Image (spheres, grey):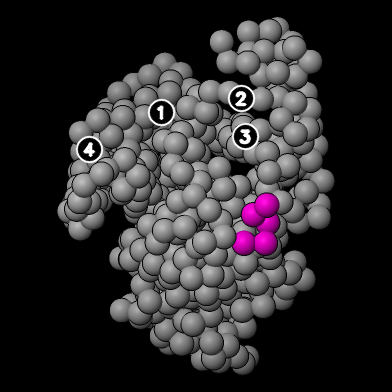
Amino acid sequence: MIPLSIFNIDISSGNLILLVSFLMFVAILMAKVGTKFGVPTMLLFLILGMLAGEDGLGIRIDELRVGEFLGHLAMTIILLTGGLETSMAETKPIIKKGISVSTLGVFITILVSGLFIFYAFGTRIGGAGASIMGCLLLAAVMSSTDSASVFSILRTKRLTLRENLGPLLELESGSNDPMAYVLTILLVSILESVHGSTGEIHTWSIILSGVWILIKQIIIGFVVALALGYGARWLITRIHLQSSPLYAILILSIALFANGAASFIGGNGLLALYVCAIIIGNTKEMPAKKEVLIFFEVITWLSKLMMFLLLGLLAKPSQMHTVLVPAILIGLFLMLVARPAGIMLSLLPFRGLSFRAKLLTSWVGLKGAGPILFALYTVIEGVDGSSEIFNIVFTITLMSLLLQGMTISPMAKLLNMSIDDDPEVETFGMEVPEEMGMLRDHIVSQEDLESGETLRDLHLPHGIRVMMVRRGDKYLVPHGSMKLMVGDKLVIIMGDTDD
């Protein structure tokens, strides 16, 4: 029995159902208000959990492993849906950039922020933080970009970005957990060895072992994903099920199996599940695809709500004031220095992304469930100073959702990286049925032509097509190799596609 002590209510009590339903109802109302004022829904769910937690209404979760398991299960569902909704056509051109950002970028971010923590606060945050390895552990825990937060903000707000940046941000957030996760485990192992050993510690041996584990996890994760993903595509197009919901359950079972199978043989389960979901989601002529996506959208929102509520319940705001100043300064350094350094350096070998696009990518480094779950792992493993690590990471997560989550749209507009959604557009008398999408116009600027002069070089986001080009008094039929000029007016349609 896991006690959830609020007025003598525990997990076996019938009143717990009443309590959970009340929290879910309040969360939906908070989400409605938050949408009106531009507050990230995930932040509101997290705050509601804190208010209902041990320092609020008094709900307490004593078995942390259960909380960690439920959190990872919810993250699995969220990644699965994100993968199913990812277009392979959009992802393929940026896959090398995404992998570089989610591996090399994460490593650079950890190194830069870890050194800052050590030299600025290493002796002040206590416990494991007093050592360089402890500071790197804290940096590793908070290094990953949270997929739930990124998917929610980009898709709920329907934020359409230039230079194919949306798929890059989603791919990075969905695939950067392996680096952060493995480095967290590696550093925890080093700290446990240092703490428990009385002899010589072979640190380099542990580090090399960790590098091998990282490479193995990524390779095995990809192999499992490719095998099960393409196997699932073959099965889904040939099996005939009597009800469309059964297809959704079939996909869910295959994706969860990919997660478990990869983990069982030493690979990264989350990476395997995400890549497998991308392959399945891009199956041509997939039966009942619309119904399947609706099903996963529903359970994904339920997973987001329950996961952030749960993580909020685990927080103890009364203990956070002791690390408030270091957490704020570390969070600001991560947002303004370490993350931008990781993005700029990891994208240095690649062309096709403007400096403005890289700046926006560095700003969309949202923290959320991932870092908190990694911090919870240090608590479960009994790392010295883990409670301070958890409180710092939780505080930084709140900062990130508040500062970055609420300003992504304004920042995209400031950097001229978002497609203008102003409904007052010139469409030259053309009308389309409302269900087909929305007509918009766009005037080509010099910045649009930085990556190339042709229409194809614009790298328009998924679901956007150019219908007509007006150049002076001429109306031109667009095609991919058309050379654009500054001042050309494009009429575009924004809507759903069948690929």
For badge 1, the amino acid type reads Leu
For badge 4, the amino acid type reads Gly
> Of marks 1 and 2, which one's residue comes earlier in the chain?
2
Image coords of residue 227 (percent x, y): 20, 38
Q: Are marks 3 and 4 in contact (CB under 8 Å)?
A: no
Q: The residue tagged with tag 1: helix, strand or loop?
A: helix
Q: Indicate yes or no whether the magenta region holds residue 280.
A: no
What residue is shown with label 4?
266
Q: Could you say which quadrant of the image residue 31 lies in?
A: top right
What residue is shown with label 2?
61
Q: Are marks 2 and 3 in contact (CB under 8 Å)?
A: yes
What residue is shown with label 1?
252
Q: Are marks 3 and 1 in contact (CB under 8 Å)?
A: no
Q: The residue tagged with tag 2: helix, strand or loop?
A: loop
Looking at the image, which is closer to me, 227 or 112?
112
Structural distance between the alpha carbons of marks 3 and 1: 28 Å
> Of marks 4 and 2, which one's residue comes earlier in the chain?
2
Structural distance between the alpha carbons of marks 4 and 1: 22 Å
For badge 3, the amino acid type reads Leu
Q: Which residues are magenta?
A: 322-326
Q: Which label sits on residue 314?
A: 3
> Of marks 3 and 4, which one's residue comes earlier in the chain?
4
Q: Which label sits on residue 9?
A: none
Structural distance between the alpha carbons of marks 4 and 2: 30 Å
> Of marks 4 and 1, which one's residue comes earlier in the chain?
1
Q: Could you say which quadrant of the image residue 203 lies in?
A: bottom left
